[in-house]
């Protein structure tokens, strides 16, 4: 699990947050300064929960660092929060805590979830294609689907569409088509709406 903001590169400092080593980097792009952090040794899947993310952000805030964005690689793989035995309740609590981080820290939280089986054969994903627990939809300001359908894969195209959006109108059947070159690590070479 990592929360990153910035450009990567050589660490400017190695410190500790809650007794765990972290790498802190500072970069400047134009007139904007960025900092990023990530657990120094990384955390294995299911080894870190949403409360741990919040604890790290709070610890770094004591040093004067404020998160503009938190990127969590796949929220459904975070460790379950203590006290919840039902898998759906665990997932709901994780998503509630991530939503709470965005509200209390006034920052963007980005994560991913997987579509259910029905979504594999659909051109446009919608609310019916959220895996595990539909209550995730109630915790997000916006969610969009990334889908590759039919021959789009061979043409290196992906389709992005709104699944839910709290403010403003949207259509699940209106999408942004994105050209990709994943072989060189470029998920967006061109796009058309």
Image (cartoon, helix red, strand yellow):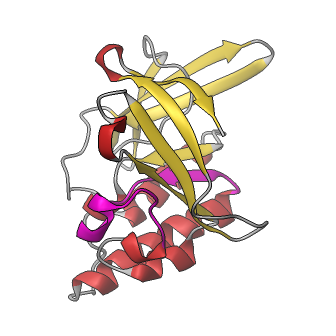
Q: Nearer the viewer, residue 47 or 142?
A: 142
**Residues rendered magenta in the picture:** 106-126
Residue 82, quarter of picture: bottom left
Residue drawn at (77%, 68%) of the image: 167
Q: Is residue 105 left or right of residue 21?
A: right
Residue 162: name its quadrant.
bottom right
In the image, residue 13 sits, relative to residue 43, either above or below, namely above
Q: Quick check: 84 left or right of 169?
A: left
Where residue 110 appears, x then y in whole percent? Answer: 52, 51
Image height of 65 relative to 156, above or below: below
Residue at 40% over, 35% down: 38
Counting from the top left corner in percent of width and height, residue 64 is at 66, 39
Residue 104 magenta? no
Q: Is residue 10 left or right of residue 169?
A: left
- Asked whether residue 159 is in view, the answer is yes
Residue at the far front: name it.
151
Q: Residue 10: percent from the left, percent from the top?
A: 43, 11
How many discs mark residues in the rendered view?
A: 0
Name the foreground residue: 69 vs 172.
Answer: 172
Figure check: 4 above or below 92: above
Residue 59 in sight = no
Closer-to-camera residue (2/110): 110
Q: Position of residue 67 (x, y in %)?
A: 62, 44
């Amino acid at each position: 699990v990592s929360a990153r903001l910035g450009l990567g590169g050589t660490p400017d400092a190695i410190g500790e947050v809650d007794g765990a080593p972290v790498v802190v980097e500072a970069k400047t792009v134009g007139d904007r300064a960025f900092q990023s952090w990530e657990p120094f040794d990384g955390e294995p899947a299911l080894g870190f929960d949403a409360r741990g993310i919040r604890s790290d952000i709070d610890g770094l805030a004591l040093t004067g660092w404020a998160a503009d964005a938190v990127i969590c690689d796949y929220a459904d793989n975070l460790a379950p929060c203590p006290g919840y035995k039902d898998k759906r309740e665990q997932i709901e609590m994780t998503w509630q805590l991530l939503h709470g981080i965005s509200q209390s820290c006034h920052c963007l939280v980005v994560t991913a979830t997987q579509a259910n089986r029905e979504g594999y054969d659909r051109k446009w994903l919608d609310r019916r294609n959220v895996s595990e627990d539909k209550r995730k939809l109630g915790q997000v300001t916006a969610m969009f689907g990334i889908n590759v359908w039919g021959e789009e894969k061979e043409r290196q195209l992906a389709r992005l569409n709104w699944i839910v959006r709290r403010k403003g109108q949207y259509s699940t059947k209106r999408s942004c088509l994105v050209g990709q070159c994943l072989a060189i690590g470029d998920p967006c070479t061109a796009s058309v709406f």
